[in-house]
């Protein structure tokens, strides 16, 4: 459809041109103006393109220049930083050496002072030790004398107390069993000792039975104690009679017969 329309337009245009030569001239003149405008526009476009290309080249050159300047500035800053770091390291090393020397000097002074104080302290310690040793020895001697005196006094008191207790016990036994005034024989002494031991065991058994409220055992302990008293009286009577007969024989006295007694 569009192709038929174009053909019609061309035919119409040819018909107009053949019938009106002035219109054709105007049309040609207009085409020339259009062509001139196109050339002018193309020149301007080319000029703008050239100017843009030149600006791009200048921008690239400026960027390259700026990059180079930046690299130079960075390198220069790096060199300056390196120099400052080296300077600081040198100063730090110098300060370190100064501090080390000062520390060594201070250490030597402290060591000397400490040695001097140590010598003085050793002398004071030695004197103090000697004084304490003498003081302690004096206290020990005094305490030893006091203890020895107290021990002797206590030993004498203990001897007197033991002797008094022994005599009191013997007087009690003499009064209880009608013993003679002279010292008992070996057999009598053994009987007295055995009797006391048996009574002590029976008393202990009775105390234990009372602690657990065992009345049967309490009664049995009392019964055994009575039997022990009876046995002891019979044995003691026999031993004393034997002693009396032996003494009479030694003295040459006549003894009555057992039937007469």
Image (cartoon, rainbow, N blue to C red):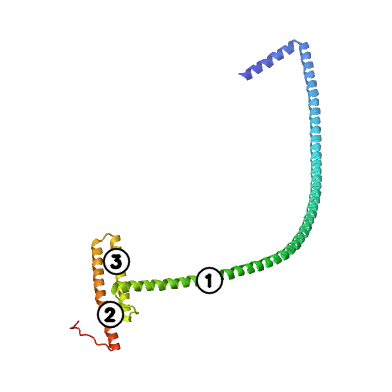
Q: Which is closer to the viewer, label 2 or label 3?
A: 2
Q: Earlier in the sequence, mark 1 or mark 3?
A: 1
**Label annotation for residue 205:** 3
Mark 2–mark 1 Cα distance, whole angstroms, equals 45 Å
Identify the image quadrant of the N terminus. top right
Whether the residues at callouts 2 and 1 have beta carbons within 8 Å, the answer is: no
Give me the residue at 81% from left, 35% from top. Answer: 58
Q: In the structure shown, which secondary structural element does the residue marked by tag 1 occupy?
A: helix
Q: Relative to 52, is 81 above or below? A: below
Q: Residue furthest front?
A: 253
Query: Residue at 26% across / 71% down in the picture?
Result: 229
Q: Label 1 vs label 3: CA separation?
A: 43 Å
Residue at the spot 51% in from the left edge and 69% down from the top edge: 150
Residue 188 versus residue 133: which sits nearer the camera?
188
In the picture of the structure, the residue carrying the numbered disc 2 is 240
Q: Position of residue 128 (x, y in %)?
A: 67, 65
Crowding at dot 1, Cα within 10 Å, few <14 / some 14-19 / many 20+, comes out as few
Closer to the camera, 138 or 176? 176
Residue drawn at the location 24% of the way across and 76% of the way down: 234
């Amino acid at each position: 459809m569009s192709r038929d329309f174009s053909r019609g337009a061309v035919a119409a245009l040819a018909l107009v041109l053949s019938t009106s030569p002035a219109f054709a001239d105007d049309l040609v003149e207009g085409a020339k103006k259009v062509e001139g405008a196109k050339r002018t526009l193309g020149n301007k476009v080319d000029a703008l393109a050239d100017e843009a290309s030149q600006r791009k080249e200048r921008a690239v050159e400026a960027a390259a220049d700026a990059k180079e300047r930046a690299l130079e500035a960075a390198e220069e800053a790096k060199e300056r930083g390196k120099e400052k770091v080296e300077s600081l390291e040198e100063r730090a090393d110098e300060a370190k050496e100064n501090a080390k020397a000062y520390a060594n000097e201070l250490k030597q002074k402290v060591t000397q002072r400490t040695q001097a104080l140590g010598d003085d302290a050793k002398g004071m310690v030695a004197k103090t030790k000697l004084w304490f040793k003498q003081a302690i020895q004096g206290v020990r001697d005094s305490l030893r004398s006091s203890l020895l005196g107290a021990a002797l006094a206590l030993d004498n008191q203990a001897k007197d107390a033991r002797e008094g207790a022994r005599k009191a016990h013997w007087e009690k036994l003499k009064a209880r069993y009608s013993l003679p005034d002279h010292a008992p024989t070996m057999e009598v002494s053994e009987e007295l000792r055995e009797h006391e031991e048996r009574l002590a065991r029976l008393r202990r058994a009775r105390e234990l039975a009372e602690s657990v409220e065992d009345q049967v055992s309490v009664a049995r302990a009392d019964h055994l104690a009575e039997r022990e008293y009876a046995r002891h009286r019979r044995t003691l009577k026999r031993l004393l009679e034997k002693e009396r007969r032996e003494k009479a024989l030694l003295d040459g006295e006549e003894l009555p017969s057992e039937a007469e007694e």
